[in-house]
Image: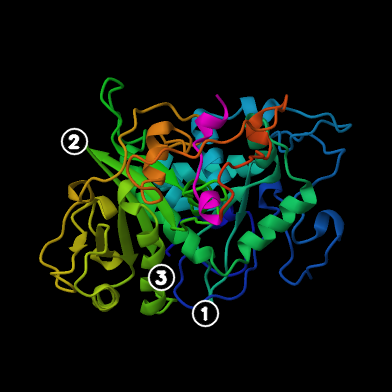
Amino acid sequence: MTGHDDSASADGMALGGADGAAGARRPITANPNAEHANGIRADQAHIRGAGPKSRMNINTRKNSHVGPRGGHCVHRGGHPDAGPWFRLLDRDRRLLSLLAEHKVLTTDQIASLEFASVRRAQDRLRKLREMGMLFAFRESLYGGGTSQTRHALGYPGARLIAAQRAQKPPTPAAYALSLERLACSPTLDHRLGVNGFFCELAAHRNPALHHLATANPVQGLTQWWSEKQCTDMFWTHILRDDQLHPDGYGCWEEHGRVVRFFLEYDTGTESLRTVTSKLADYQSFPTDNFGILLFSVHSARRETGLRTALRRALGSSDPGLVIATTSRDLHHPHGPAGPVWAMWTATNGDTITERLPLADLPERGPRIIHHPSLINPCNEADFDHYDPTVYDLFITNQRQPDTPHPAPIAPLHNETDPTDQDILIEWDDPTPEGLRRSISPPDLLR
C-alpha cells in the first residue's frame, strides 16, 4: 500500500525512507509514543517495564503534566480531565468510534471517510496524536521505505470511548499489550484490507465531499459490522455455539434498493479448498434471510480459480444462497460499489458473462427503518438480534412451520439489568433437541 504521510506527521515512529517504497516487510519498528512526541532511538532495545522510555509506553504516570497542547487527559495530581473530549469535533468522535470497533485504519482510509484531502487528514491526525487520542505506527520495508501510517486508539482515546459507552476502561498495561499485539499481528494486513473494502463504500457518504440534503433518505453504506460484531450477532440459539464468522457484514442502499451482504475477503494466503470449505457454515446458517455472500479476491486469476473451486464443491446443486465474486485488480472508480460483481450459479460455473454494480445484486435480508447511530457510525440500518421480526429469521431453519417456541418456566428474578446477567432457564423439554431450540428473549423478559 502506498503511503502519503510526510515524515513530520509520522513523529519519528519508524525507520526507513519515504512512504510506500516497494519491497517485502521487515519486522515492526513502530514508535507507539508518537502521540506524545517522544522520540525513540533506532537501536533502543525493547525492555518491558523500562518506564517512560520503553518501546510500548503510553505514558500512564499519574502526575502527568498538561502541556501547552493539552497532550494528556490527567491534571497534575492525578485528577481526571474531561477537557479533551469537549475539544473534539463531531468528526473526531466518529473517527474514535470507528477505531474502537474496527481497531486500525490507515491515513488514506481515514481521509476517504471524513476529509476533503489527505493533507487535511494528516494535519488533523497529528493534532489528535498530540492530544493522546490516537496511537500511530508504521512498518519498515526491506529495501528502504515504510508502509503508510496506521492509526489506532491511544489510551486516553480508549478511556473516553469507554466513558461515552458507560463501560469500564482497560488498564494501561492491558491496553499497551493490546496495541503491541495489534501492531505485530500476522493478520494485520487482512484486517486493513477488510477495513479498506468498507472504507471505499463509506467514502460515498464522506460529508466533506458529498453534501446530501437531510430530507433525502440515507444512501450508501448504512451498515458496517466488524468480524467480532458479526460473531456476537449471528447465532441461532441461546447457547451461541452455532455462530457465523464472516470478515464483515454490510448494507448498501441506492435508489430504493437495499443489498445486505456477508463479506469474505481473500488475500491469497489460504488454499482455495480452505476458502470453499467456509460454504458449509453459510449453508447451515439462514444466510439467505440476511444477505448475499460476496467473495473479494486479489486478482482475476484467483477469481477464476475460486469460481472453479465453487463449481467443484457445489456441483450442479443449488447452494441455497446468492454468491457473487469480484477481483480487486479491476480498479473501478466507484470501487466495490461499481459494476465489478459477477454472479455465481450452478449453471454458469466459472464463466463470467457480465459484471453488475453492488446495488443491482439480489436483495436479501430485512428492511430496517433508519435510526441515528451515535455510538457506531455507518450503522443506520443495523438491527437487534432480539427484535421479534429479525429473530424469526434466525430460527427459520430450526423448527418446522407452525411449531411454537418451547414454553420456558419463568427465569429467576434479579433486580439488576437482565442484559448484564446470565439468564437461567428451566426447560420443559430437557432433551438435547429441546436444548438446541431457542427462546425468543422478548418472551423471557415480558
Identify the residue at horizontal 49%, vertical 55% (top origin).
243
* Residue bearing the label numbered 1: 143
Q: Is residue 132 visible?
A: no
Q: Position of residue 443 (x, y in %)?
A: 51, 30
Q: Is residue 337 visible?
A: yes
Location of the N terminus by quadrant is bottom left
Location of the C terminus by quadrant is top right
- Of the image marks 2 and 3, the number of the one nearer the N terminus: 2
Question: Along the line of sight, which residue is nearer the eye, 412 or 233?
Answer: 412
Q: Position of residue 52 (x, y in %)?
A: 83, 53
- Of the image marks 1 and 3, the number of the one nearer the N terminus: 1
Q: CA distance from mark 2 to mark 3?
A: 32 Å
* Residue bearing the label numbered 2: 255
Question: Along the line of sight, which residue is nearer the eye, 196 or 255?
Answer: 255
Asked if residue 434 lies in the magenta stretch, the reply is yes
The secondary structure type at the circle numbered 3 is: loop
* Residue bearing the label numbered 3: 267
Quarter where residue 305 is shown: bottom left
Identify the residue at horizontal 60%, vertical 66% (top origin).
185
- Taking the image as shown, residue 63 lies to the left or right of residue 254, namely right
| Region in magenta | 432-446
Quarter where residue 302 is shown: bottom left
The secondary structure type at the circle numbered 1 is: loop
- Of the image marks 2 and 1, the number of the one nearer the N terminus: 1
Q: CA distance from mark 1 to mark 3?
A: 23 Å
Amino acid type for the residue under numbered disc 2: His
